[in-house]
Amino acid sequence: MTNRTKRLRKTLIGNVVAWALLGFTAQIFVAAARSANTGMEWNEARNSISDHWGGPPLVIEPVEGEIVLRREQGAAPLRLMPLDGRGLPKNQGIPITAKKGMTFTFSLLERDATIWYALTP
C-alpha cells in the first residue's frame, strides 16, 4: 500500500525561519510544518518515494501559533504582514504593540492562507 499526498493533516510540529535583510527595515520569515508534491507516493515503510515524486501544486501545511519577540524598551510598534506567493502584502497587516514591557506577541493563523510573512516597523 502506498501513501499518496493529496492534503496534509495538521501537525503540532513546525519551523519558523527568519531573515533580516541588509538595507531593509522588514524582516521576512517563513512558518511551515510539512510540504509535499501533489500525488507524491511513499512506500509502506514511509522512508522512500523512489521515483514517485508527484507534481505541482506543492502542498504546504502552514503553522498556526503564537510568536513572542523581545525588543528593547521603547521600541517602535511593529506590523505583521502576510505575504502572497510573489512576496507582496496580502493586506494592510496587523499592528503589534508591546505588552508586558519589551514583549511583542503575534499570532499566525490559518485564515492568513500563507506561510510567508514580513515584520515591519
Image (cartoon, grey):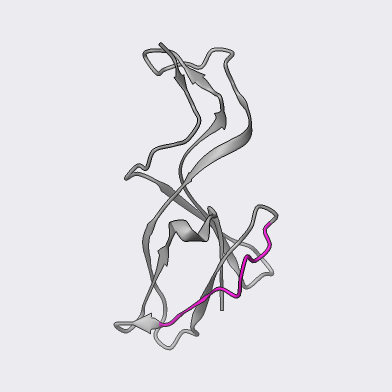
User: Residue shown at 39%/46% (left/top)?
Assistant: 14
User: Residue shown at 43%/88% (left/top)?
Assistant: 74
Q: Is residue 101 above or below residue 40?
A: below
Across the whole image, how many numbered discs are drawn on residues?
0
- Residue 121 highlighted magenta (yes or no): no
Image coordinates for residue 38, horizontal then vertical, percent: 57, 30
- Residue 48 appears left or right of 89: left
Q: Is residue 96 above or below residue 90?
A: below
- Residue 107 appears left or right of 28: left
Where on the picture, by quarter, is residue 100? bottom left
User: Residue shown at 59%/36% (left/top)?
Assistant: 58
Q: Residue furthest bottom?
A: 74
The stretch in magenta equals 87-97
- Residue 88 highlighted magenta (yes or no): yes
Q: Is residue 50 above or below residue 87?
A: above
Characterize the magenta stretch by its predominant secondary structure: loop
Q: Say which quadrant the N terminus sits in.
A: top left
Q: Nearer the viewer, residue 71 or 68?
A: 68
Where on the picture, by quarter, is residue 67? bottom left
Q: Say which quadrant the C terminus sits in.
A: bottom right
- Residue 48 appears left or right of 91: left
Image coordinates for residue 85, horizontal then vertical, percent: 65, 52
Where on the picture, by quarter, is residue 83? bottom right
Q: Nearer the viewer, residue 25 or 33?
A: 33
